[in-house]
Amino acid sequence: MEALLKNNKSQFLDIFTTVSGHKSNLVSLNSWWDKVALVGKINSLNVPQSLLSNMLETKAEFSELQEILIENLLSENMQQCGVKNQAVAQTLIDIPVRNLFERTADVGFLATDADILAFLSDSTDHVPDTSAIVKRLTEYAAKYSVYDDIMLFDETGQLKVQMDTGADISGDDPVIAEVLTGEHEYLEICRYSPLRPAFPLSSLFLSPVKDPETQRVTGVLCMSFKLEGEMRSLFADLDDGSGAIMALLDKQGNTLVSADETVLPRGTALNVNRSNQIITLGKHEFYCTVARTRGYQGYAGLGWQGCVLLPFASMSAHPENSEENSDDVQRWQGFSPALSNIRHKAKIVTEDLDLVVLNGRIAAARSDADEFIPILEEIRQIGRQMQSIFTDSVSQLMNTALNTHYDGLVFQAALAIDIMDRNLYERANDCRWWALTGLFQSVLNKRRSSPDDAAAMADVLSYINDLYTVYTGLYIYDRNGKVVAVSRPAMKALEGTTVYADTGAGQVFNLKSSQQFCVSEFVPCDYYESKYTYIYNAAITKDGQVNGGIGLVFDSGPEFKQMLEDVTGGENDGIFGLYTDRNGHVISATDNAKWKTGDRITLPDIISKGGNGHKGAGIYKINGVEYILAFAVSKGYREYKTSDGYHNDVIAIMGEPNQPVKSQQ
């Protein structure tokens, strides 16, 4: 950033018109001061030369301070653009990577689905009835709504069934043959594929389907992820009206998906060797920021990158003089020493000038040089005008610095709540899909199940739990609410007991379709060692009759904490993270927060009563202590919390004590 500013200073002065305006006014005042001083020197021969020298020394101090001021004004304006763009670019890659990580689990698990195994293992000569398996795949896509097609290929690589029955396949894709070797747990590609010829870009996840007894590859499962739709939705969420062009780039810097294909069409190559640079597209210049993936749970995907291109015209339109936070500017103690020093020095130089003028009046009186009095008054006026510019500039500088700080914290809060919504969307999907497991449905439909039935269900639950480690346990309960199978030996004592009321299981028997689910309140639960958590439930049905349900105990402690720490970076200059409900009950907190899960804090109304998706930042008191707090209220993801009937507002908060920065202490 510093090198970019140094090499393009004049260009950025043209962009930030308020800064260039201050500089122009100061240059004019300096020039007028020189002329007035020259007039005084010519017409006031009786005035001591030392007085004129003092005036010049004071002017030199002003000039030096002016350079520092302009440099800092430019730097802070650049910093504000840079911080915001970096946060957006990082979000553009962090969110997709987490999303795609879930897809790797999906394709691996669905490839072991009993119905799919049976369909691909059918060796009879008759033409198979594909309607049942299409229905099965459609049910899956209804739960995990991020897929627009699911395909099954046999062991020769021939398409056997396709969920999107109206879509054509124009030819073979070599990736099918690669998956059929059985050497990969899954493969992920993002490019044009003849398997989806209507789309210039396909995001496909593929896994071999293996016979569970012999491990022979019997076919390939291919799932088509709605990458472009997901990115369009993310672009819309992050659009702040600045005119910035957001994009997802591949590892080499080629554009995969762009928010504006007229300026940045798919396939456009960008130089991504360094971030924060000036690039030219067509005849227009952009401030380019790129962020690389930080990975998630060891998954880095295909090495994609987030990119933000801010037009120079949008940089000049940045609200440099916003008075919205003027009160907070007076209260914020986090200004850097450089900013505080400018204000302090400006005050000292003005006082020095007043002293010079006072001495000049005395000297003029002693020397009978009345003609010098108007010169002194004019210089005093010049000094006052300079001081006014300094005051306005420093106020703008501090306002910009605070806005920059707020922007960074708000983006962290928005990212934290988005990560939570997207993660819990997957949990709602999991419980509904696993409730459709044929074994669970057939066993619970019996009037009386055997120990072998319970053992078989426990084996399946254990297999699922081994794959999906975000749960401490899974369990099945029958129509009477009795736990009949569990996934972990530690839960064995629950078998035969009635499922607890605080698990949300009671609502299961009122669910009307396989698309519905229910979640417990966030309360301490005996199934989670009396700690706070959510339990996700879905009904297990047969022929429209609810015969029981499945419960998923979410490992909320480490999972929520990890979400917050992924955003704050763990230890980040004292910034803490919180998840709370609207009543201030703490759902999770980073280690450096003063509160822990289960505590209750009194939140300001602007935070607790904001609408879904509302976000902001300010300086607020909690228990008599001032904090800088940024917040974002959950808004849901896709149908989750938006149209599925589930309501549970959570607020993500990023904060820090309002105290001087460490370097000032």
Image: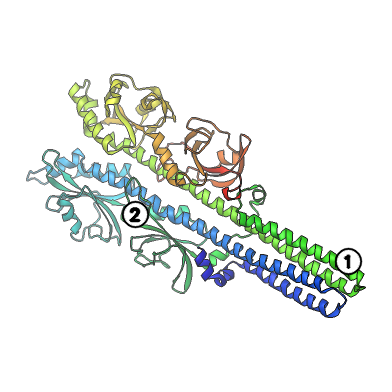
Which is nearer the eye, 81 or 137? 81
Q: In this image, 44 relative to 62: left or right?
A: right
The reply to whether residue 642 is in sight is no
Q: Is residue 507 above or below residue 66?
A: above
10 Å crowding of disc 1: few (<14), some (14-19), many (20+): some
Q: In this image, 320 relative to 46: left or right?
A: left
Residue at the extreme bottom of the image, as rendered: 42
Q: Residue at x 29, y 20 (%)?
A: 493
Secondary element at tag 1: helix
Query: Disc 2 to disc 1, how far (Cα)?
Result: 78 Å
Q: Which kind of residue does numbered mark 1 sit on? A: Ile
Which is nearer the eye, 116 or 344? 344
Q: Which residue is mark 1?
A: 362
Which is nearer the eye, 232 or 525? 525
| Quarter location, residue 531 | top left
Q: Position of residue 131 (x, y in %)?
A: 20, 44
The reply to whether residue 523 is in sight is yes
Residue at the extreme top of the image, as rendered: 497
Question: Which circle's residue, 2 or 1, is located before the other in the chain?
Answer: 2
10 Å crowding of disc 2: few (<14), some (14-19), many (20+): many
Q: Residue at x 28, y 47 (%)?
A: 104
Q: Which kind of residue does numbered mark 2 sit on? A: Leu
Q: Which residue is mark 2?
A: 227
Residue 641: numbered disc: none
Q: Position of residue 454 (x, y in %)?
A: 22, 25
Q: In this image, 389 relative to 504: left or right?
A: right
Residue at the extreme left of the image, as rendered: 125
Residue mark closest to the camera, 2 vs 1 = 1
Q: Position of residue 113 (x, y in %)?
A: 21, 40
Which is nearer the eye, 654 or 60? 60
